Amino acid sequence: MKKLLILLIFLSGCVICCCKDNHTPVDSLIKATLNNVIENWSNNLCDYPKSLDEFVVYAEKHDNWKNQPIKDSLQSTLTFLTEEKKHITWNFSYPTVTTMDLTILYYNDTIYRKSDKLLFPGLEVSLYSYNWYHLEYPDSIEELIAYDSLSHCLHQGFFQCCDVTFDYLLKNKDKMVWRKGEGNILIMAGNDTIAYQGDDPQIQYCDDSVISNKNIFRFFDKKGRYAYSEELEKNVKTGLIQLRAKYINAPQEIIKWHVFEYILESGLRPFCKNDDIKMDTDWFKSIEDYMYIFCCENDLSRVVFIAASY
């Protein structure tokens, strides 16, 4: 009798265990549809759904499911996810600042897994844009965001990716190292590189062939923000021409074109580090005086421009 009782208890336990684990494996079409919709989400929103509810809302509202077989498979997938929600575990995490992981379990079966490095879409083009206009890289993520890089980023077709990238980097700024060198920038998190660029303005703009085009003009407001306008460029060019006519009575041969930088707080200097021009002449003193007035009249703190030596 005792052995029979033990046998019954054992068999009852087996039945209970079998009932707990007795579920039908997820259909391969549902898995494929789940994968396709998540990839669609990632491509359009530059992110991943953080929960099952987010996924369902997106899949139901998205209007690109025009093919009937796709609509049918999507409906089957949504029905499955809704009916089996209590048996589904949706785990999304950032194991490190530069990686993501999304694992979806049905009971203990993995029905989706994605573990990859983050791409930070829009960051590279924003850094390049900032450097192009400011002739240097930003000192921080806040400075990059404060700059109008969002519109430049959007104009390059990244759309909402810029928001996602900037919000994420801002939240994780304390985990990042922002190393700005001379003509380069390196952004790291731990041992992982988030971004690196080395477009040195000293190389880009200090070549004689570039300077001879005479098209390097940058203007910055009192807060150091890029403030270029065609009117400012036209006015400063006109002013320099008039200054030359007033200062130099007889025609003189232009010795060389130079890139100069005028900073309201410190005065005039060559922008290019390899430029050893002597600036202790009345001509350059008159340029410095003119740029002081120009900056004060236009609420500027810094101007980078082309001018000749005689």
Image: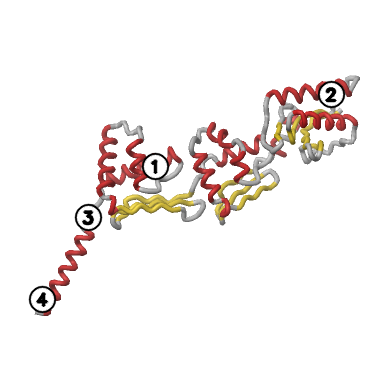
| Mark 4 nearby-residue class (10 Å; few <14, some 14–19, many ≥20) | few
| Coordinates of residue 283 in the picture (x, y in percent) | 88, 29
Q: Earlier in the sequence, mark 3 or mark 2?
A: 3
Look at discs 1 and 2 and give the one toward the viewer. Answer: 2
**Residue nearest the observer in this picture, 86 or 255:** 86
3D distance between C-alphas at marks 3 and 2: 87 Å
Q: Dividing the picture into quarters, in which one does residue 270 lie?
A: top right
Estimate the spatial distance between the alpha carbons at disc 4 and disc 1, rounded to whole Å.
Answer: 56 Å
* Residue type indicated by callout 3: His
Q: Nearer the viewer, mark 4 or mark 1?
A: 4
Vertical arrangement, residue 170 with respect to residue 5, above or below: above
Query: Is 292 displayed left or right of 145 in the figure?
Result: right
The amino acid at mark 1 is Glu
**Distance between mark 4 and mark 2 Cα atoms:** 112 Å
Q: Earlier in the sequence, mark 1 or mark 3?
A: 3
Q: Which mark is first along the chain, 3 or 4? A: 4
Label 3, secondary structure: give it: loop
Q: Is residue 93 left or right of residue 309?
A: left
247 vs 251, nearest the viewer: 247
Q: Are marks 4 and 3 in contact (CB under 8 Å)?
A: no
First-in-chain label (1 vs 2): 1
* Residue corresponding to mark 3: 23
Circle 1: element type: helix
Mark 4 to mark 3 CA distance (whole Å)? 30 Å
Task: Give the image location of residue 50, x and y in percent.
Answer: 40, 48
Q: Which residue is mark 2?
A: 243
Q: Which residue is mark 4?
A: 4
